Each structure stands twice: as C-alpha cells, then as structure tokens.
Image (spheres, grey):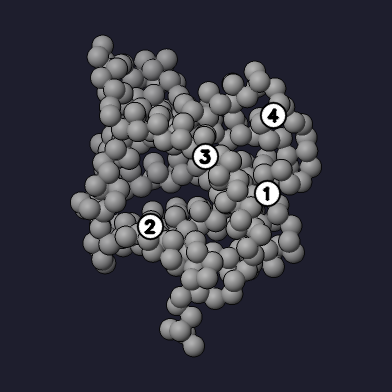
Amino acid sequence: AIMTAVAVLWVYHPTGYSDDFLAFLEDIAGGNPHVVTLLFGIIFPIVHSGLASLRPFGEQLVGPRAWRVVFAFPSLCLAYSWIAYFIGHAHAGYQFYDISGNSVAHTIAWTINFFSFFFLYPSVFNLKEVAAVEPPTYHLWETGMIRITRHPQFVGQCMWSVAHLAMVGTSFTALTMALLVGHHAFACWNGDRRYYDAHGEAFLKAKARTSIVPFAAILEGRQVLPKDYWKELVRAPYLFIAVGTLGAYVAHPYMQSGAALIQNTGLVQGGILDGLFS
C-alpha cells in the first residue's frame, strides 16, 4: 500500500510530485548538480533521522503501525529521488580518475559492494514489523552482525560508498558519498541516544560489549563470540539479500535507463492532489 502511494503520489510524473520537488531544488541550485545533491544530503537526514527521533512521541499519538507509515512514506520518496538523481549525474563535475575499465579494480569494488549489503540490523529480518503488518518494536539486539559492529548499516554504507567512488571518480560522486557516510555517522550517535532513551541501563551494558568499528570489541576482549556463532548468521533472509544484490547489479543498465527517462521527461507540473488545493 505504501509503495503504491509512493508510485502514484511521487514517482509517476503526471500524478506525482517528485518532478516538481526536483525542479524546486534545481531552481534553488541554479542547475548545479553539486548543490542539488547537497540539498538532498541536508533534507533527507533531517526528514529521515528527524522522524526516527520523533518515534516515541509519534507512536503515542497515532500508534506504532501508523507511525511506521508516517516515517516510511517521506523517507522512501526522498530516497527514490536522490538515488535517481545520483544515477543520472554520477559522472558530473570534475573527473579525478577513471579506473572503471580496470577489471581488477572492478572485481574488488564489486566484492566490497556485494558484502556491504550483509551489514544489516537484525530488525530488518522482521519483515512484518518493517511493513507495519505487526506493531514495530524498538529491539535491543546483541547477536548476529551486532557482535561485529553495533551500527552495521553505517559500516555497510561506508563500504558501498568507497566501492562506488572507486569506480566513479568524479567530484559529484565524491560529494554524494561524503553526504551519505556523514548521515550514517550521525545516525550512530543518534541511534545510541535513542537506544539509551528506550532501554536505559540495558543499552549501556550492551554498548560496553559492542563497538561501532568492526571487530574492535572482539579484539579488545569486550565481546566473546560463541563457538556456534555461525548459526546466528546462517539465516534465510541473507539468501534473499544475496539474490537481490546480484539482481541489482544486473539491473544497473535499467536503473541508468530509468534515470535517463526521468531526466528526459522533465517537469510535468502538478499532480493528482492539485484539485484539493485549487
């Protein structure tokens, strides 16, 4: 239901408002793609992390399931627009280097990118909570990937950004990757703050046994992996992640075509809700 709303109200130009929003940003930026991605890099964290921080208050007002919808809809809309804009302008700006034709560099970057998608919070596997079919719960995890790093999606984002910047050495890509990593670095602090607010002393104990830097707590002796630790990682969702990641790689030409289509279609002013405000 949320994805249908995103498609109708945001993605599809004749009925949605993604093109109007992008035109608004480009007007502010004077057409400079670096400024546009900078604006995305400011607006998305404010909306995404802001709504995440407001979760305790929002859930009291409308309940956890409804708040998940309030949180997810604008985040998905902005993520779609930023990703599409990045794909369409990845080669904009100054070209520092270009090693995309180097097969060894491509293999290394591909491998880093592939494994970056396995750095996920265990909550991602609770698909019914993610989709708000069941009331979302703010879990305090200390198993699986959390034993390696307390903020796996920050690590995964760093890996993904390094891999893509290695292949597309432009100033636009460098700025976009810096904004993405910066947002996730902030999310480490904000996430710890939210964990403490929700779980108090229990989180402080978990924090003492984990680390943000991968493997740091293990090397320092604060985290001891159980002998059957591998069982915590052998989970069916990882198979779907592997297949999805490979599928996304194969779909890269279609993503680029889609981004080009968006750019060539341009602005179709207004959308399906115009009648409500006329």
Looking at this view, is 51 or 235 the one in front? 235
Read off the residue under disc 1: 89
Estimate how packed mark 4 is, as few (under 14), some (14 to 19) or many (20 or more) residues with alpha carbons within 10 Å.
some
Number of the label disc, if any, that sits on residue 127: none
Q: How many marks?
A: 4
Q: Which residue is mark 4?
A: 100
Work out how far the residue at label 3 is from the one at label 1, CA to CA, in angstroms: 18 Å
Amino acid type assigned to the residue bearing label 4 in the image: Ser
Task: Indicate which disc residue 3 carries.
Answer: 2
> How far across and down, in percent of the image, does residue 14 sit?
52, 70
Frontmost of labels 4 and 3 is 3
Query: Given the image, on which type of amino acid does mark 2 rest?
Result: Met
Q: Secondary structure at mark 4?
A: loop
Q: Quadrant of residue 119?
A: top left
Q: Is residue 81 left or right of residue 171?
A: left
User: Where residue 205 sits in the image (x, y, percent)?
Assistant: 29, 31
The CA distance from mark 2 to mark 3 is 19 Å
**Contact flag, marks 2 and 3 (Cβ < 8 Å):** no
Q: Earlier in the sequence, mark 3 or mark 1?
A: 1
Question: Residue at point 73% right, 61% down?
Answer: 31
Position of residue 210 measured from the top left corner of the image (x, y, whole percent): 36, 27
Q: Amino acid at mark 1?
A: His
Element under label 1?
helix
Q: Looking at the image, can residue 42 be seen?
A: no
Label 1: how many residues lie within 10 Å, few (<14), some (14-19) or many (20+)? many
**Residue at the (34%, 28%) spot, across then down:** 239
Q: Residue furthest left?
A: 134
Q: Residue at x 35, y 19 (%)?
A: 222
Q: Which callout, 2 or 4, points at the residue further toward the start of the chain?
A: 2
Q: Which residue is mark 3?
A: 251
